[in-house]
Image (cartoon, rainbow, N blue to C red):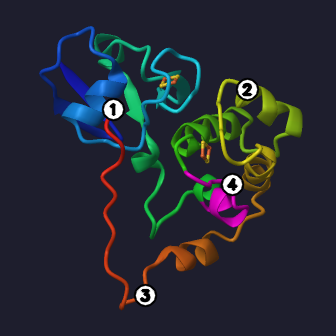
Amino acid sequence: MELTVNGVTRAISSPPLTSLLQVLREELDVLSPKAGCQQGGCGACTVLLDGEPRRGCLVPVAAAEGHEITTVEGLGTPGDLSPIQAAFHQKYAAQCGYCTAGMLMASHALINRNGGREVQREQVIEALSGHICRCTGYVKIVDAVIAASRGDVDVEKEQGLLVAEPSEPAVEPKGAPA
Ligand code: FES
Ligand code: FES
């Protein structure tokens, strides 16, 4: 089988009923989707399939073949943030970060579905209703999504804050095991 992840098509050897989450993390080393409940209930594993949010823990990898899979790695990088990533940083919408990748993907899809227009608070709450966060209390997350949809975020400034000082050692988090 082959999977197209963030625009790159790669051959995989996992059995067809392996979860997409497991293949992304264990075989392809794409570590932004997180393994939370692994039962479809928390949203930490959310990725986009052809632009729509899907629970990676519930999708057999065979069902993802032929579709465009997008993860946070495809949204942006620390030096080239997407607006939704910059908004989460600006609004302090992430704490431990375990839920954040799933929140980002669902939020990005919501803004795209809305044609890039400003989203209403109720829309954000509905879109993120299946996403569990144990840290933030949700208010800052909802504020960040609304700000991103309004274009009310200084992406360059937030990127500048993420660039390490020359004296700081590089940190390469490996992510939690699935
Ligand atoms: S890990 Fe997939 S929904 Fe919780
Ligand atoms: S930031 Fe910790 S679970 Fe959401």
Marks 4/3: CA–CA distance: 23 Å
> Where does the C terminus fall, quadrant-wise?
top left
Find residue 57 and report its image quarter. top left
Left or right of 126? Residue 112 is left
Q: Which mark is residue 118?
A: none
What residue sits 51% from the left and 22% below the top?
A: 54
Marks 4/2: CA–CA distance: 16 Å
> Label 2: how many residues lie within 10 Å, few (<14), some (14-19) or many (20+)?
few
Marks 1/2: CA–CA distance: 23 Å
Span shown in magenta: 86-96
Q: Which mark is residue 129?
A: 2
The stretch drawn in magenta includes residue 84? no
The residue that label 1 is drawn on is 178
Q: Earlier in the sequence, mark 4 or mark 2?
A: 4
> Label 4: how many residues lie within 10 Å, few (<14), some (14-19) or many (20+)?
many
Marks 3/1: CA–CA distance: 31 Å
Q: What SS does tag 1 mark?
A: loop
The residue that label 4 is drawn on is 93
Percent position of residue 159, x then y: 54, 73
Say what amino acid the circle numbered 4 marks.
Ala
The residue that label 3 is drawn on is 165
